[in-house]
Image (spheres, rainbow, N blue to C red):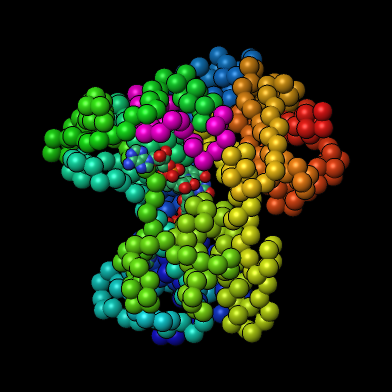
Amino acid sequence: MEYDVVVVGAGPVGENVADRARAAGLSTAVVENELIGGECSYWACMPSKALLRPVTARADARRVPGLRAAVRGPLDVAEVLAHRDYYASNWKDDGQVGWLESIGADIHRGRGRLAGPRQVTVEPPSGERYTLTARHAVAVCTGTRALVPDLPGLAGANPWTSREATSAGKVPDRLVIVGGGVVAVEMATVWQALGSRVTVLVRGKGLLANMEPFAGELVAEALTEAGATVRTGAPVAAVERDGGDGPVTAVLDDGERVEADEILFATGRAPRTDDIGLDTVGLKPGSWLTVDDSCRVEGSDWLYGVGDVNHRALMTHEGKYQARVAGDAIAARAHGKPVDTARWGAHSATADHAAVPQVVFTDPEAAAVGLTLAQAEAAGHRVRAVDYDMASVSGAGLYADGYRGRARMVVDLDREIVRGATFVGPGVAELLHSATVAVAGEVPIARLWHAVPAYPTISEVWLRLLETYRG
Ligand SMILES: Cc1cc2nc3c(=O)[nH]c(=O)nc-3n(C[C@H](O)[C@H](O)[C@H](O)COP(=O)(O)OP(=O)(O)OC[C@H]3O[C@@H](n4cnc5c(N)ncnc54)[C@H](O)[C@@H]3O)c2cc1C
Ligand SMILES: NC(=O)c1ccc[n+]([C@@H]2O[C@H](COP(=O)([O-])OP(=O)(O)OC[C@H]3O[C@@H](n4cnc5c(N)ncnc54)[C@H](O)[C@@H]3O)[C@@H](O)[C@H]2O)c1
């Protein structure tokens, strides 16, 4: 069987590569060995955000005078979980299968493996293995799996990973979460609000280490106020559980024991490349795929690595952006058209380096784009951080009584543009795109001054940041 393009992995990224290839008139096969829609739809973004929305909505409502009494009670756990199930499409992919078929891509169910240049073998759940040939490109979009450390006792302890944390049907009385990143804080927010007593064990100094330090501090403060325990400098050395069921114990480095009913390891991701035939094309199995800005694997003229698997920015929106870029680049190369891989060119995922936005959907939300102060300094930029207490913004005060939050804008002093921005506080998620436009657009501060935020919205924090910068 021959196609112009073969896509391995039908998560959000593989689907979007296929979409762009089909839109350019290329015949396209998509190989998927679990559910069409990938991690994001069933065990990551969608279920986690469906679980978080009632939690943050209730927290927001409790800060509005006159509304507090109406939302004093506990969350309806069954309804929250049912809402989550709905957003995870009850772990069925009919809807997404229909969409892929509607764009004219052929679906091949089974494990895909490279078998030399431009060849992909498909191993269906039942039936014989067969080979697909790609005339122009193979796009590996196989994503990641949870990375669980190799600790004594852990393998037999039946730990939760992000999959169980987003799909569990029962609230554990006590939940220990190992890790201090995005999955850890979002899942701590959910399960604490649903009734678990949550303990977060962070090996480092604080939460959300990739963001400005105040983000992790404000989220830790709020988690603690919600009743969770956040312990920093608490590395886990071993895990004990009898028979993989019943109570589970995290044994810390210093011998202290923390008992719980479930333990979640939110300790990062590993690429799903260990069993996809990388060795048949001279690459190392289990490695992240190193790609150029068009997402083509370095040294190859036909192999692409798009989305999580290339380790550039592990988020759905970034992966889908890369998919649009890579899909268009594949099409341009296939049709012999010009390929523009210059910075900010049509076939260059430039934003991956300069303007990656992320929202952490905790209470408070933490939203950031571009470089933090530390990252900008490390990159050699001459920058100044401009901070503002969001509580002093009229729109924030109206949004929530006793609003707590903080904003930072990192200004490049040589170019007078914004290199990065971070907002932490209730309701800041929707504010982030304004900052993304400023950072990706490299909008001069002098012109931002004319971008007038409406009164009285939380967006007025922009005006306050600019006023503070200009003194
Ligand atoms: C708990 C959690 C919450 C998250 N929340 C957010 C969020 O709110 N916003 C956000 O932007 N990002 C979020 N992310 C990150 C987001 O889920 C990923 O960035 C995104 O899923 C990456 O998409 P992908 O298509 O590259 O990979 P995946 O979604 O992992 O899809 C890869 C697909 O490839 C298939 N596959 C793998 N190997 C093979 C093979 N050999 N043959 C055939 N098929 C194969 C898999 O079955 C899967 O369907 C979250 C992640 C987690 C863990
Ligand atoms: N809202 C969102 O955008 C969102 C939500 C969830 C996940 N994601 C993405 O998914 C990816 C995975 O998230 P994550 O939280 O698993 O990874 P992460 O890299 O954000 O955090 C991993 C955490 O685990 C800790 N850790 C690693 N190894 C450890 C060990 N052996 N013992 C103790 N602690 C250890 C790290 O210090 C860190 O605090 C992220 O890249 C993130 O971008 C995004």
Task: Answer left or right for 200 relative to 352.
Answer: left
Q: Residue at x 68, y 24 (%)?
A: 389
Position of 160 relative to 195 (above/below):
below
| Ligand 1 position by quadrant | bottom left
Position of 222 relative to 178 (above/below):
above
Q: Residue at x 70, y 52 (%)?
A: 440
- The quadrant the C terminus occupies is top right
Task: Answer left or right for 459 relative to 274.
Answer: right
Q: Position of residue 450 (x, y in %)?
A: 86, 40
Q: Which residues are magenta?
A: 187-215
Q: Magenta stretch containing residue 62, yes or no?
A: no
Q: Quadrant of residue 461?
A: top right
Q: Position of residue 64 (x, y in %)?
A: 63, 19
Single out the residue that lies furthest toward the left. 243
Q: Quadrant of residue 79?
A: top left
- The quadrant the N terminus occupies is bottom left
In depth, the one of 107 and 329 nearer the eye is 329
Position of 356 relative to 21 (above/below):
above
In depth, the one of 162 and 57 nearer the eye is 162
**Count of marks, rendered view:** 0
User: Can the viewer see residue 334?
Assistant: yes
Q: Magenta stretch containing residue 206, yes or no?
A: yes
Q: Position of residue 356 (x, y in %)?
A: 60, 50
User: Can the viewer see residue 164?
Assistant: no
Q: Residue at x 66, y 31 (%)?
A: 407
Q: Residue at x 18, y 43 (%)?
A: 156
